[in-house]
């Protein structure tokens, strides 16, 4: 069964450093998403991406964040200058159609720890 | 601020019983509703989707939707210890956006052997 994959599973970085989180969505899916979950809190939407452009982004997704689909399979989230409060689980998800009308499938996540 | 509300629990049921999980949402234009299961330290796993009023059954799971009451529920029949997890209710975004899900905080379910 196809699944979303993410690398790395755990990333430790120092405050102010740049990190890139990587995702490979399900192959026939067209819509891609990033969510995050701070420990003990709810899953929060960051950004959605379709046809090589951002469809929607949340207030969390400020200028420190960017997304890219560098090739036909990978989807990346970059945080330019990490802050302590960026420590969280980051989940990539994908869907065949627009997220409100179709099911989103989540990857296993990347645990980001900023020290 | 559009919200999805769930009782945080924990909800404790004996093995073999029916577990009932509830969710309310504030945005009347929401169209799609999803239940995810999340084990501790893991990612959300999709269990059910429901788009129209009424019941939808899939194995031991039944999702119920009442748009007039802005209420969606999940019933788990013949609960098993392996069902012990946090159950997340998710709703398609407010304002008619089709591009994101808004999650509740989740209900922790414990099934006791």
Image (tube, rainbow, N blue to C red):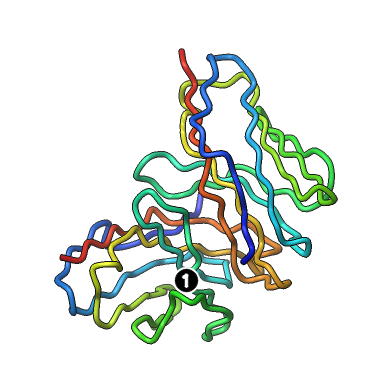
Residue at the location (47% across, 65% down)?
A25
Residue at the location (57% across, 83% down)?
A51
B24 left or right of A48? right
Residue at the location (57% across, 39% down)?
B7
Q: Residues within 10 Å of mark 1 (few under 14, many from 20)?
A: many
Q: Quadrant of the C terminus of chain A?
A: bottom left
Asked if A75 appears above or below A90 in the picture, the reply is below
Task: Name the residue that disc number 1 marks.
Answer: A46
Residue A111 % position (x, y): 29, 57
Asked if A53 appears above or below B112 in the picture, the reply is below
B35 left or right of B53? left
Query: Helix, strand, or loop for circle 1?
Result: strand
Residue A72 % position (x, y): 45, 78
Return the residue nearer the eye: A111 or B108.
B108
Residue A53 % position (x, y): 53, 86
Asked if A114 appears above or below A18 in the picture, the reply is above
Q: Quadrant of residue A87?
A: bottom left
Mark 1 belongs to chain:
A
């Amino acid at each position: 069964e196809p699944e979303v994959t993410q690398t790395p599973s755990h990333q430790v970085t120092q405050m102010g450093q740049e990190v890139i989180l990587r995702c490979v969505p399900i192959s026939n899916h067209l819509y891609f998403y990033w969510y995050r979950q701070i420990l003990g809190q709810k899953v929060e939407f960051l950004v959605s991406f379709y046809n090589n452009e951002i469809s929607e982004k949340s207030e969390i997704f400020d200028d420190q964040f960017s997304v890219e689909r560098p090739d036909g399979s990978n989807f990346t989230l970059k945080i330019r200058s990490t802050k302590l409060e960026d420590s969280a689980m980051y989940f990539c998800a994908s869907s065949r159609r627009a997220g409100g009308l179709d099911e989103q499938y989540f990857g296993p996540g990347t645990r980001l720890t900023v020290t | 601020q559009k919200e999805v509300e769930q009782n945080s629990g924990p909800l404790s049921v004996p093995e073999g019983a029916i577990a009932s999980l509830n969710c309310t949402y504030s945005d009347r234009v929401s169209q799609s509703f999803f239940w995810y299961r999340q084990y501790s330290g893991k990612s959300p796993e999709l269990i059910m989707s429901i788009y129209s009023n009424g019941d939808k059954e899939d194995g031991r799971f039944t999702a119920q939707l009442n748009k007039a009451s802005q209420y969606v529920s999940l019933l788990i029949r013949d609960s098993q210890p392996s069902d012990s997890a946090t159950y997340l209710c998710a709703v398609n975004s407010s304002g008619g956006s089709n591009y994101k899900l808004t999650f509740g905080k989740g209900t922790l379910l414990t099934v006791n052997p």
